Image (cartoon, rainbow, N blue to C red):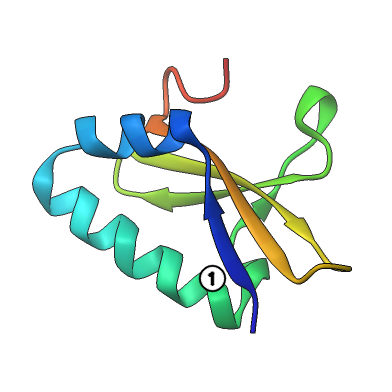
Amino acid sequence: MYKIVISPRARRELKQIAKLYRRVSIELIEELKDNPYLGKQLTRELTGKYSCRVGVYRMIYKIDKVDKKIYILSAGHRGTVYQ
């Protein structure tokens, strides 16, 4: 089981997500503890990171296999979260 670490930026961004999607995002974070590879592996400048989809929102995270931690880096609308 992995431990979840949410960055201050991601915490702020999660608060701005619509209430329904925020609840689903929190449930998804809980699921990541057991299966961190639920998301899609990203490429190019985001190599080594993963993205999970919640409606029109995305969560960007990276996995530390050695320490068994998942770092939630960013969360937001799909049009802006990858910037």
Q: Quadrant of residue 43?
A: top right
Looking at the rendered image, the quarter that the N terminus falls into is: bottom right
Label 1 packing within 10 angstroms: few (<14), some (14-19), many (20+): some
Q: Position of residue 68 (x, y in %)?
A: 75, 71
Q: Amino acid at mark 1?
A: Leu
Looking at the rendered image, the quarter that the C terminus falls into is: top right
Towards the viewer: 16 or 43: 16
Q: Residue at x 59, y 59 (%)?
A: 39
Towards the viewer: 46 or 11: 11
Q: Position of residue 47 (x, y in %)?
A: 83, 36
Q: Residue at x 46, y 33 (%)?
A: 8
Determine which residue is flagged by label 1: 32
Q: Quadrant of residue 36?
A: bottom right
Q: Is 27 displayed left or right of 51 in the figure? A: left
Q: Is 31 displayed left or right of 17 in the figure? A: right
Q: Is 81 displayed left or right of 38 in the figure? A: left
Q: How many marks?
A: 1
Q: Position of residue 29 (x, y in %)?
A: 44, 64
Q: Residue at x 14, y 39 (%)?
A: 18
Q: Is 56 displayed left or right of 20 in the figure? A: right
Looking at the image, residue 15 lies above or below residue 24? above
Looking at the image, residue 24 lies above or below residue 58? below
Towards the viewer: 19 or 15: 15
Tell me the element at label 1. Answer: helix
